[in-house]
Image (cartoon, helix red, strand yellow):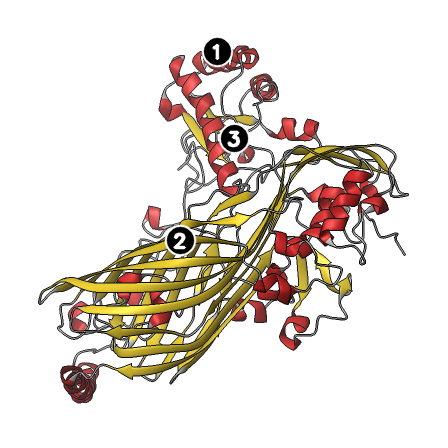
Amino acid sequence: MKPRLKTYVPVRQWKKTVLLVVGLIGCLAALPQSFVGYGYDNYSGINGVILNPGGLAGSKYKVNVNIISFSALAGNNAYELDKKNLFTLKFSHLSEGNGYYKASNTSYKYLYLNTDILGPSAMFNIDKRDAIGIITRVRSIGNMFNLSDPLFRLMGNPDPSYYNTNIINRSLQVKTMSFAEVGLSLGRILKQTADYRLKVGITGKYISGISYGSISTGQMNLNIDPTNKITNFTGDVNVRYTPNMDNLGTGGSIRDALTKNSGTGWGMDLGLVYEWKPEFDSYKLRLGFSLTDLGSINFYNSPNGQNYMGTLTGHNTSQLVKSDTESVNQYFTRLQDSGLIVAKGSSSRVKAKLPTAVHLNADYHIYKKIFINADILFNTVANTNQLTPNYITTATITPRLEKKWFSIYSPVSYNVQGQLNWGAGVGIGPLFVGSGSVMSNLIKSRIQHADVHVGLTVPIFQHNKNEEKKEKKDKKKDKEDQKKADTLYRKILITHDRDSDGVVDEKDACPDSAGPIQLLGCPDRDGDGVPDNKDKCPDVKGSPNFDGCPAPDSDGDGVNDDDDKCPLVKGTLANAGCPPIRTDLVMSVSRASNRIFFVRAKANLEKNCLKELDHVVSVLKADSTLKLVIQGHTDSEGTDERNAALSVRRAMAVKKYLMAHGIAEDRLETHGYGAHRPIASNETAEGMAQNRRVEMILRNWQKK
């Protein structure tokens, strides 16, 4: 069996200490958006107000009381869990390699864990224009970002190939906070006409901090040998956590931590809803905008919550591991007394912002009780913020069937970490239950994301005589419409389709010869997509570009004119029917490409590469038939979206230089491939430098 690595302070501190310092993250759980798929239902009541207080006034309810609702989510790109363990809820026997596994990706690792518990809460419609709501709520939000893959491979069951390796990790962020809140919501219909309704809402909330913890680093350097001896470690680690976590590990309990005040703050939500209502009692389109969790919490900071510096050589990693008999306070005291870390100072308070987010929402009424909802949650807190955990920017599409006592919804969501999830939920009377990922997890063998929400409410509906009359009228009209449709269909089928091909004679271009609908009812004997009445070779499969006849080879080079980029000039199959380009020119442009590199995260051309581009200019000017394809590339640092944009900018930088030196724009074609086409390993600085490049390819034909 491989030796289990007990590694240096930042990692093990995260693995053992942080889970105690900020341990409430584990006992409270999570989600980037609460009640995925349910919150924008017209019968979500007070549960929808936490997403947009603008929906408070003019709701379906006279009174709506939430008894208890719970929403939780967890996701990461570091580990994968066997699906069977999630659905059986059996975790105690699991270990790495037996039930859960390290993911194979080499990206920087991230983790998010959040919960949202909506306690006893209620909303009341005061009159036709105004409403009020009272909210009690407990949340826990946690993130980890920027854990490098080599460092991750040394955690848990270590990968021996990373021993005796210089590992660099930049800007590791671990952040979590738990807090309770009491809120008062006010909603009002600002304006209502026969065609539309405009509503606004605001929620003010008092925040009581439960726990807080964060770890952030600058650049850390680490080298460990197979005996768990630290060959080299240098780095700064900034630790912040609330004092109620200090005694965990020696008699202190989570219950004790929960009962001690950790800080206070104030928050606010703002919301706006516009409903387009061509029919008086229901909208056709509803648009929503809200800004949630404006504000901050001023947490107390433990005396051990300081900026620490570590420079270690020759120490065993076991010296840096917190023992089960140590409290958190004793652990930090031991590390400082033994000289393993040096404190550089701290403050007595930590001001953490609330996880501020912008919500954009559109709800479209398709037909009867069928709706489709589109929602985007924009996180406004940067991942590099050292103190504040944040939600994950997520886009969600949710079709639903919605009735007063029954609803079904199926959200499909995609977040900026690249996770695509498909879920389902149901509401029956006062109970609702669902998940934003259950369907996608059912079709996977291993999962990296899971969530669930469930709630119990007491609904008291508005009495709407107009709506009841409309429902009866709609049912009667549906029966009449169906009867008319059946009669009309039979009449057309019997009297207006002579060749019985499914195309009525009025629209049939060949009413006496059966043919496919795509060809307006005309036959096509050779199946080439050209109807026989327009096909000059009706019994030989041909090309639509040549009236149904086989494409010729005008220049006799073995490439038919449909595929030939140079149909009138003899060429080669390898060059798409165009004459071959001189090998020496191709090689010289390729060599020039190999000498153009970029600074990390930049798209500026370096001075030492300009002479290479000048050579390319001379090649293109010497032969006006030549064109150039410019492909931009990046290393693996950063997100896929960032790298895609950066690679395009690098290709465009080359294009702009060539244009500035007399090359026409229509001779230059650019593409950006991000980090998806590396030519060297991204595990080393040298390999990453090679991948920050452009490639230039000569052509003598224009892409169609």
Relative depth, front residue between 580 and 550: 580
Task: Indicate the amino acid at tag 1.
Answer: Ser
Q: Please state which amino acid type lies under the numbered disc 2.
A: Trp
Proximity of marks 3 and 2: CB atoms separated by less than 8 Å: no
Find disc 1 in the rendering and name its residue: 618
**Relative to residue 573, is residue 514 depicted above or below?**
below
Between 473 and 276, the one nearer to me in the picture: 276
Please rate how many residues cluster around mark 2, counting C-alpha atoms within 10 Å: few if below 14, some from 14 to 19, many from 20.
Answer: some
Alpha-carbon distance for marks 1 and 3?
21 Å
Query: Which is nearer the N-term, disc 3 or disc 2?
Result: 2
Q: Position of residue 85 (x, y in %)?
A: 68, 72
Which residue is at a point 25% across and 72% down the rendered structure image?
A: 59
Left or right placement of residue 578 versus residue 200 in this view: right
Q: Residue at x 44, y 32 (%)?
A: 555
Which residue is the site of mark 2? 266
Q: Name the secondary structure under disc 3.
A: strand
What's the CA distance linking mark 2 and mark 1? 66 Å
Identify the residue at image location x=72%, y=52%.
328
State which tag comes first along the sequence, 2 or 1. 2
Mark 3 = which residue? 632
- x%, y% of residue 603? 49, 25
Query: Whole-percent x and y of residue 237?
Result: 67, 38
Q: Quadrant of the C terminus?
A: top left
User: Do the residues under discs 1 and 3 have CB atoms within 8 angstroms?
Assistant: no
**How many residues crowd mark 3 within 10 Å: few (<14), some (14–19), many (20+)?**
many
Single out the mark in the foreground, 1 or 3.
3
Q: Does residue 618 sit above or below 227 in this rendering?
A: above
Which mark sits nearer the N-terminus, 1 or 3? 1
Residue 173: quarter of image: top right
Q: Amino acid at mark 3?
A: Gly
The quadrant where residue 220 appears = top right
Name the mark nearer the viewer: 2 or 1.
2
